[in-house]
Amino acid sequence: MNPRLDSVVLEGVSPNLSPFMDADRQQAVTDIAAANHFMPLTGTTKPGPYALHLSIAEGRLIFDIRDRYGLPLTAIGLALGPFRRIVKDYQILIDSHILAVQEGRESRIQAIDMGRRGLHNEGADLMLQRLRGKIEIDFDTARRLFTLVCVLAQRVSAR
Protein backbone atom coordinates (compact mmCIF):
# COMPACT_ATOMS: atom_id res chain seq x y z
CA MET A 1 0.00 0.00 0.00
CA ASN A 2 1.09 3.52 -0.74
CA PRO A 3 -1.24 5.72 1.35
CA ARG A 4 -0.54 9.04 -0.32
CA LEU A 5 -1.78 11.52 -2.87
CA ASP A 6 -0.07 11.58 -6.22
CA SER A 7 -1.93 14.71 -7.29
CA VAL A 8 -4.58 17.22 -6.23
CA VAL A 9 -6.91 18.92 -8.69
CA LEU A 10 -9.11 21.81 -7.57
CA GLU A 11 -12.34 22.03 -9.51
CA GLY A 12 -14.20 25.33 -9.72
CA VAL A 13 -11.45 27.69 -8.55
CA SER A 14 -12.29 31.36 -9.02
CA PRO A 15 -10.35 32.95 -11.86
CA ASN A 16 -10.21 36.11 -9.72
CA LEU A 17 -8.01 34.82 -6.89
CA SER A 18 -5.78 37.42 -5.32
CA PRO A 19 -2.09 36.84 -6.01
CA PHE A 20 -1.69 35.99 -2.31
CA MET A 21 -4.43 33.31 -2.39
CA ASP A 22 -3.04 31.92 -5.64
CA ALA A 23 0.41 31.68 -4.04
CA ASP A 24 -1.16 29.87 -1.05
CA ARG A 25 -2.85 27.46 -3.48
CA GLN A 26 0.35 26.77 -5.36
CA GLN A 27 2.33 26.25 -2.16
CA ALA A 28 -0.27 23.86 -0.69
CA VAL A 29 -0.36 21.76 -3.88
CA THR A 30 3.46 21.70 -4.04
CA ASP A 31 3.74 20.73 -0.38
CA ILE A 32 1.16 17.96 -0.76
CA ALA A 33 3.04 16.59 -3.78
CA ALA A 34 6.27 16.56 -1.77
CA ALA A 35 4.92 14.83 1.35
CA ASN A 36 1.51 13.66 2.53
CA HIS A 37 -0.39 10.83 4.14
CA PHE A 38 -3.80 10.05 2.63
CA MET A 39 -5.71 6.79 2.85
CA PRO A 40 -9.43 6.33 2.18
CA LEU A 41 -11.00 4.14 4.85
CA THR A 42 -14.34 3.64 3.09
CA GLY A 43 -15.48 3.04 -0.46
CA THR A 44 -12.33 1.44 -1.85
CA THR A 45 -9.74 -1.17 -1.03
CA LYS A 46 -7.49 -0.21 -3.92
CA PRO A 47 -4.02 0.84 -2.73
CA GLY A 48 -2.61 4.27 -3.46
CA PRO A 49 -1.21 6.50 -4.57
CA TYR A 50 -4.40 8.44 -5.24
CA ALA A 51 -5.49 11.45 -7.25
CA LEU A 52 -7.80 13.82 -5.37
CA HIS A 53 -10.28 16.04 -7.16
CA LEU A 54 -11.49 18.55 -4.58
CA SER A 55 -14.56 20.70 -5.16
CA ILE A 56 -17.51 22.39 -3.49
CA ALA A 57 -21.00 21.48 -4.65
CA GLU A 58 -24.35 22.25 -3.04
CA GLY A 59 -22.79 23.30 0.26
CA ARG A 60 -20.60 20.22 0.47
CA LEU A 61 -16.88 19.71 0.22
CA ILE A 62 -16.39 16.82 -2.21
CA PHE A 63 -13.37 14.53 -2.02
CA ASP A 64 -13.50 12.72 -5.38
CA ILE A 65 -10.82 10.07 -4.93
CA ARG A 66 -9.40 8.43 -8.03
CA ASP A 67 -6.58 6.06 -8.78
CA ARG A 68 -3.35 7.48 -10.17
CA TYR A 69 -4.72 7.04 -13.71
CA GLY A 70 -7.85 9.08 -13.01
CA LEU A 71 -10.32 6.22 -12.67
CA PRO A 72 -12.95 6.96 -9.97
CA LEU A 73 -12.66 4.98 -6.74
CA THR A 74 -14.95 6.72 -4.26
CA ALA A 75 -16.33 10.12 -3.34
CA ILE A 76 -16.78 11.51 0.13
CA GLY A 77 -18.81 14.63 0.88
CA LEU A 78 -18.51 16.77 3.98
CA ALA A 79 -20.90 19.50 5.01
CA LEU A 80 -19.15 22.83 4.47
CA GLY A 81 -21.01 24.50 7.35
CA PRO A 82 -18.53 23.58 10.10
CA PHE A 83 -15.71 25.15 8.07
CA ARG A 84 -17.47 28.45 7.24
CA ARG A 85 -16.40 30.50 10.26
CA ILE A 86 -12.74 29.50 10.01
CA VAL A 87 -12.72 30.04 6.23
CA LYS A 88 -14.33 33.46 6.65
CA ASP A 89 -11.78 34.43 9.33
CA TYR A 90 -8.99 33.20 7.06
CA GLN A 91 -10.25 35.33 4.17
CA ILE A 92 -10.41 38.38 6.45
CA LEU A 93 -6.81 37.76 7.50
CA ILE A 94 -5.73 37.45 3.85
CA ASP A 95 -7.36 40.80 3.07
CA SER A 96 -5.67 42.35 6.12
CA HIS A 97 -2.32 40.89 5.07
CA ILE A 98 -2.61 42.37 1.58
CA LEU A 99 -3.44 45.79 3.06
CA ALA A 100 -0.57 45.59 5.57
CA VAL A 101 1.88 44.71 2.78
CA GLN A 102 0.64 47.65 0.69
CA GLU A 103 1.08 49.95 3.68
CA GLY A 104 4.50 48.48 4.53
CA ARG A 105 3.50 47.68 8.13
CA GLU A 106 6.00 44.94 9.04
CA SER A 107 4.83 44.43 12.63
CA ARG A 108 1.23 44.12 11.43
CA ILE A 109 2.28 41.56 8.79
CA GLN A 110 4.00 39.45 11.46
CA ALA A 111 0.93 39.57 13.71
CA ILE A 112 -1.33 38.56 10.82
CA ASP A 113 0.99 35.68 9.90
CA MET A 114 0.77 34.39 13.48
CA GLY A 115 -3.02 34.57 13.24
CA ARG A 116 -2.95 32.71 9.92
CA ARG A 117 -0.88 29.91 11.45
CA GLY A 118 -3.39 29.63 14.29
CA LEU A 119 -6.32 29.47 11.86
CA HIS A 120 -4.48 26.88 9.76
CA ASN A 121 -4.04 24.74 12.87
CA GLU A 122 -7.70 25.16 13.82
CA GLY A 123 -8.74 24.30 10.25
CA ALA A 124 -6.47 21.25 10.24
CA ASP A 125 -7.93 20.02 13.54
CA LEU A 126 -11.43 20.40 12.11
CA MET A 127 -10.40 18.62 8.88
CA LEU A 128 -9.00 15.70 10.88
CA GLN A 129 -12.17 15.53 12.98
CA ARG A 130 -14.54 15.67 9.99
CA LEU A 131 -12.59 13.04 8.03
CA ARG A 132 -12.22 10.64 10.98
CA GLY A 133 -13.37 7.17 9.90
CA LYS A 134 -13.54 8.23 6.24
CA ILE A 135 -10.01 9.24 5.23
CA GLU A 136 -6.85 8.88 7.27
CA ILE A 137 -4.57 11.92 6.91
CA ASP A 138 -1.76 13.45 8.93
CA PHE A 139 -1.78 16.95 10.44
CA ASP A 140 0.39 18.54 7.72
CA THR A 141 -1.81 17.15 4.97
CA ALA A 142 -4.88 18.41 6.85
CA ARG A 143 -3.35 21.93 7.04
CA ARG A 144 -2.69 21.95 3.30
CA LEU A 145 -6.14 20.62 2.47
CA PHE A 146 -7.64 23.35 4.66
CA THR A 147 -5.73 25.94 2.60
CA LEU A 148 -7.26 24.45 -0.56
CA VAL A 149 -10.74 24.58 0.98
CA CYS A 150 -10.19 28.30 1.60
CA VAL A 151 -9.20 28.75 -2.05
CA LEU A 152 -12.29 26.88 -3.23
CA ALA A 153 -14.50 28.89 -0.88
CA GLN A 154 -13.43 32.04 -2.74
CA ARG A 155 -15.56 30.82 -5.64
CA VAL A 156 -18.54 30.26 -3.37
CA SER A 157 -18.31 33.67 -1.68
CA ALA A 158 -17.80 35.43 -5.03
CA ARG A 159 -21.30 34.48 -6.20
Image (cartoon, rainbow, N blue to C red):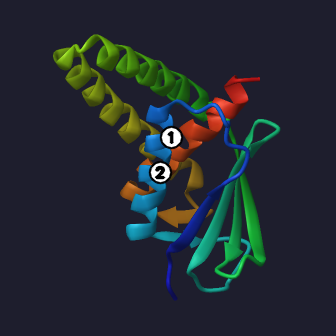
In this rendered view, identify the residue nearer to me: 65 or 93. Answer: 93
Q: Is residue 49 left or right of residue 27?
A: right
Q: Is residue 30 left or right of residue 57?
A: left
C-alpha span from label 2 to label 1? 6 Å
Residue at image coords 63%, 40%: 152
Task: Estimate the x, y position of residue 127 in percent, counting from the top left.
Answer: 52, 47
Task: Estimate the x, y position of residue 24 in percent, counting from the top left.
Answer: 44, 42
Residue 102 sits in quarter = top left
Residue at image coords 25%, 29%: 114
Q: Which residue is mark 2?
A: 26
| Picture layout, residue 125 above or below residue 94 | below
Residue 151 sits in quarter = top right
Are circles 2 and 1 on residues that touch, CB within 8 Å? yes
Q: Is residue 10 left or right of residue 87?
A: right
In this rendered view, identify the residue nearer to me: 95 or 103. Answer: 103
Q: Is residue 119 left or right of residue 46?
A: left
Looking at the rendered structure, which numbered label has been put on residue 22? 1
Task: Estimate the x, y position of residue 158 in percent, counting from the top left.
Answer: 70, 24
Quarter of the picture holding the C terminus? top right
Looking at numbered disc 2 in the image, what kind of residue is underneath it?
A: Gln
Q: Residue furthest right?
A: 58
Q: Is residue 114 visible?
A: yes
In this rendered view, identify the residue nearer to me: 19 or 80. Answer: 19
Task: Estimate the x, y position of residue 17 in percent, counting from the top left.
Answer: 58, 33
Q: Residue furthest bottom?
A: 1
Residue at image coords 51%, 51%: 145
Looking at numbered disc 1 in the image, what kind of residue is underneath it?
A: Asp
Residue at image coords 64%, 34%: 153
Dot 2 surroundings within 10 Å: few (below 14), some, or many (20 or more)? few
In this rendered view, identify the residue nearer to me: 13 or 125. Answer: 13
* Label 1 secondary element: helix
Q: Is residue 36 visible?
A: no
